[in-house]
Amino acid sequence: CENELDLQPEDNREGPGQVLQDPAAYKQFLAKVYAGLAVSGQVGPAGNPDLLGLDEGFSQYLRLYWMLQELPTDEAVIGWNDGTIADLHAQNWTSGNEFIRTMYSRIMYQIAQANEFIRQSSDENLSAYGIEDSQRAEIQQFRAEARFLRALSYYHAMDLFGNPPFITEESPIGAFLPPQIKRADLFLYIEEELNAIMGDLAPAPHPEYGRADQAAAWTLLAKLYLNNEVYLSDKGSAVADQSRFKSTSEYYSLAATNSKKVIDAGYELVDDYQKLFLADNDSNGAQNEIIFPIRFDGINTNSYGGLTFVIHASIGGDMDPAEFGVNSGWAGLRTTPEFVGLFPDGADSSDEREMFYTEGQNLEINSISSFSDGYAVGKFKNVDVNGNQGSDATGEHVDTDFPMFRLGDIYLMYAEALFRGTGDASAALPYINDLRERAYGEGNGLVSSITEDFLIDERGRELYWEAHRRTDLIRFDQFTENGVWAWKGDVPQGTTTAAFRNIYPIPASDLGVNTNLTQNPGY
Amino acid sequence: TLSGIVTERDTGMPIPGANVVIKGTTNGTTTNFDGEYTLTGVDLDDVIVYSYVGLETQEVPFTGQETINVALAPDAAILEEVVLIGYGSTRRQDATGSVEQISSEEFNQGAIVSPEQLIQGKSAGVRITSGNGAPGGGTEIRIRGGSSLSANNSPLIVVDGIPLDQRGVQGVRNQLNAINPNEIADFVVLKDASATAIYGSRASNGVILITTKKGKKNADLKFEYDLKVSVGEVVETVDILDADQFRNLIETTPGTDVGLLGTANTDWQDEIYQTAEGAIHNLTVSQGLDNFYYRVNFNHTSQKGVLKTDLYQRNALNTAFNYDLLDNDLKLTLTAKGSVDQNDFADEAAIGAAVNFDPTKPVYDENSNYGGFYEWTNNNGVALQQATRNPLALLLQRDAEGKTKRIITNFNIDYDIPLIDELRFNLNAGVDYAENNGFTFRPTTSATVLQNIPAEEVYWGINRNQLLDFYFNYKPYVESISTAIDLTAGHSFQEFYMSSQQRYTDEAVEGNWVLNPLSINRNALESYFARASFDIDDKYLISGSYRMDGSSRFSEDNRWSSFPAVSVGWKINNEDFLKDSGILSELKLRAGYGVTGNQEIGPNYGYLGVYTPSQRGASYQFGETFYPTLRPEEYDKELKWEELQTYNVGMDFGFFNDRFTGSVDAYHRTTENLLAEVPVPAGANLSDRLVTNVGETVSKGIEVGLNGKLIQTDKINWNLNYNITFQDLEITKLSLGDDPNFFIPQGGISGGVGNMIQIWKTDIDPTTFFVYRQVYDQNGEPIEGAYVDVNGDNTITEIDRQPYKKASPDFFMGLTNNFTYKDFDFSFTWRGSFGGYMYNNMQSATGFRGAGTVTPQPYYSNFNANVLETDFNESQFFSDYYIQSADFVKLDNVSVGYLIPGEKLDFRASFTASNVLTITDYDGLDPEIAGGIDNNFYPRPRTYTLGLNLTF
């Protein structure tokens, strides 16, 4: 009876050799790579997690990315006492921080999933699985999207961790030790990948909203180039031939041209700023401004991360959850008085983008754990333009999509790229004033010139709580050695911190198992 | 008048306390300290009976002698006392491994629902910890502390020859409940590898062989009715603030709104607990004919929990039929244990809710939208989602029932092959089949139900475990070398199948029901095994065993592995120089080495990459269409067995004709290729963690068991049994890398999300706590937030967290007393545990002002009374202040009984108190909690049991 020991799964699980014979499986597999940004496992909202190292709800990609990009900045504090969460705003995290660790795991998980798609959809494998030629063109486009998603996650890894492990579809699957890549080498890799897939991606806008098109790849390229001085500050240590690096001004020029390509691709600003952050932002007009969303749905795509987290966690005190289309507040997130100060007249600003909730809240933060200290932020909501709650009748999970890339951001990037490259951003002024006009009403709030301070402050006002802040502050050298806000450095009035915190540490747990890795300086 | 001296034949020593009785009468006496007796009233043709426990009874006809001196020989039956050792048996005195038999007369008394409770505290090296106070609840059994980290640490349990599925059976609280404790004849615990290696890949955590009672040959038709009725009550509740203390605390905390306080004085813990009645009925019929004998038992058990709505019920039929054919050469045994196990599961979340719910609020509220129960609501009467739920409503507004029908049946053929003397063939065909189904229901009036239809879940499943094994046993005695040989060789195949499915209500989907896909998990194990034992000159013992296991859980390359063992013994008492010692009746030295395995790793297809489809809520939207997703799972092609190497040395001894006996064992174990769920290098696999062969643990221990028959006369018998165990376990390797500072956090706690209090790290015990060192003021009070800055960088970060103390004890012991005087008996069991620590999560989770006052919505919740001592404002979860000694001594049970023998009917009455007394310094409810984290523990009740037994 030794054959009885050859057991294979008998339920709905199958090995790749069986499941990938069905051409329809590829789109479901690709959907998993996209869903890697939105859900935390194979059962929503929780139950069969992708990652096991942290509570499933906490382990969701966007939730962690949002926390790491927002909590250490002037835009957000969180009052909870989960593990080392308080160290994020205090900027005194260590390599043992589980949120940093899980972001790192999640990014590498996402890359490994994308690699598996790329690996399985190679020509040899498609032949082996019996996929016919007529079906291959579509799979080829899926494959380019998987490469885009991999480049996006590598971009996050490069931005957050500097020098992450590096794996591609050529890497094995097992318990081997992946090599580490230098930040500047990863910069070149991402650039090369995005250029290589451009021809296989759909022209913008993609007929199926939510999928990455050429504009998404241009946006990512523009971000890469705009931050070149940060990412390539140590390019001398790169393994790659130094001649592959361009000059700073060339990079800013590329940032501007790629931004302009997006601007000319047919996207348009939605008339009302608030619409971008509502439950129906995939249909109320905002979808024409959003270049690349992470899509959520109260019934079909949910987790305890993503915007379910952001919306619930930002509600507390006297705020009525029903007004935000949810059943409860988790009383965690607020903002600092310094950020409130970016708006003229603070919480009474005539800038419509100012959405602070002040009733029962104090401007100053005496205690981070007390929800009433610090103004609350009511930017994201799970109601549609008419105020109706999203599709989940229980009010637990939200429909609101996260605008990861949107035209408003591109306008500001375009202006900044011109400003940094040539010192003259006047060609971008009309776009900037489109944003200002949307914020202040017709003919109001217009600006006539662009300065460095204006750019960083305007990015704060336009893009706050959209997970850009940390990257922006670093680019403007305001994140660590400069820039002070409440409780930065773990003191009430705030203090500056050491520059090494511009990148996060490689988690101690991975250094412990992967001897190929070297810790980032300072940790 | 007749007089004389009674001596022991082998030693010539006089025997004090031997019985001398005229046969058929009650006229008799006992010998004095010098073995002398005097008996009057003896008539010619009387027969005098001389007896003494452990020696063979002798009868001498009285023919008018003045003096009769007798020398009693050792009782051959005791010499031949047989213990099971897996695929066969051996004489107890020939066992070379660490093997311990615990028979029914030594069992714990009381209203025992789960079999393993019978032997709690009875055996050195065996630690049995009931999971909690739930009726029929599960138990953690650890033999030598367990050997693994992530794989199963429970012993293999073999019931009448069938190894049970180590994954357990779905739907029940404790899979051993299918075996009626009343029907268990004995337990045999195999501890060291030389004893367990015959069970190969499942033997690393020890093996427990359970044998149920059978009928006896040539026995009269016998009926027995046994009834145990019991009441249980909660001994103690968690020390929380009462309503006045609570009001005071809220009023003195800045920033609170006293308007939220109510006027009631509710003791929520009092509301959720009840007196738990229970009844166990056993009706047994047995009869033995010449070659057919049987035993049939019917059992009905009903046990309420001390938590309201908790109920366990069992109806079981146990049968054993034996048929001896061909002049006893062919023995057929059929055992079948059928049971219907029914549970009403209480919502144990009520235990935490009762500790947390505001005591100034009433239980009921006539304006409530929630079935008349008070709940925290907003101004519209809608329940606040984040608030604590009414504890009593959690219990009463839920119906959760489960039912498991199970049959464990085994057919055994034992055939003495006629042509060759001493050759025997044994075959077992067994099935353990269970079907379960159940549901959970909450009405829309429950505040926990968010949707507009009742929350309902229905689940069902099957467990099937099929066994076929056979072996040949050849047992010749070779005169020429005066060696008894015992050879066994056999084959076994076992397959485990498990399927389960659920559906639940969801108002957002069509038809309001979501059906989860059927989940099937099957694995199979094929084995070849052999054992050879030699007993040379009744002095020198050598035994070796070998098993080869193949498991479906590993790839073809890693599928097979072998598990050898060898052991030796030296019966020193049979050497000439000790043979006639009057003092020493047994002295045996043992030594053994063996390799065992552990394949209980969780996943069945861990070496295969499989794709898992997504279920509800995890689709992704492209355009207007939602696509279900496909996830490739992590896998380790190289996955293989965990391997444990054990060295064991032991000594068995007996004095004064085994009046005092004992054994000492010492072991050293190394687990290699440890199966652990560990972080994989990021990017190396399709998950952040992987079950893989990594690491190593080393455990050491000393076990001592002592037994004394302190008094042994025809009227009084007094036995004491004591055992003590010293254990030490540490991780010696943990990861693929070699960073000595690498660690994996363990032990999730309540308070915050994802917080862990324990640590796996090399060189320490896997239950070690990981904490900040609290700083205290001059009065010894903890200073809030002040910790020792271990690395001296002037800030407290997680680098300053240190390993400190551990949950597992350094040593533990048990003491059992059995005393009988005529027809009266008295027994008790004490247990003690020392050197273990507990994380008092009850204090840390709610023992600070912020716990009850800093809430996401307008409500307050209650505090642990510890807040009055620390006056902490914010959480200090990782302070070593909460690591508290869990040393304890427990009086587990005290029992008295009285037997009234009759002509046709024996009647016995007994009274037992269980969980009688706990002596400890630990502040929480109970110092004995598996894992070492005290968090909303379901209290173990104190139980009083009245037992009645009729035999006729």
Image: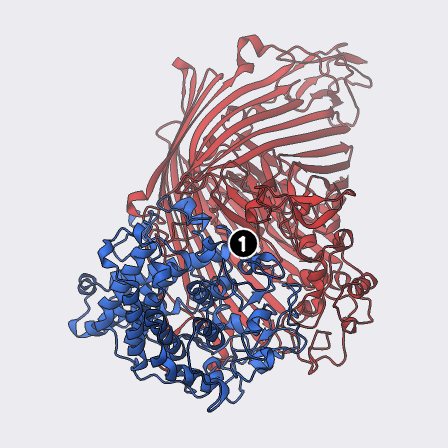
Residue B203 vertical placement versus A376 (above, below):
above
In the foreground, B799 or B8: B799
Q: Residue at x 68, y 57 (%)?
A: B874
Q: Residue furthest left?
A: A133
Residue A176 vertical placement versus A267 (above, below):
above
User: Chain B is which colour?
Assistant: red
Residue B610 vertical placement versus A417 (above, below):
above
User: Chain A is which colour?
Assistant: blue
| Residue underneath mark 1 | A92
User: Which quarter of the rendering shows the N terminus of chain B?
Assistant: top right
- Mark 1 surroundings: few (<14), some (14-19) or many (≥20) residues within 10 A: many
Give residue B207's position: percent from left, percent from top. 50, 39
Classify residue B536 as left or right of residue A126. Answer: right
Classify residue B689 as left or right of residue B453. Answer: left
In the foreground, A172 or B300: A172
Q: Residue furthest bottom?
A: A442
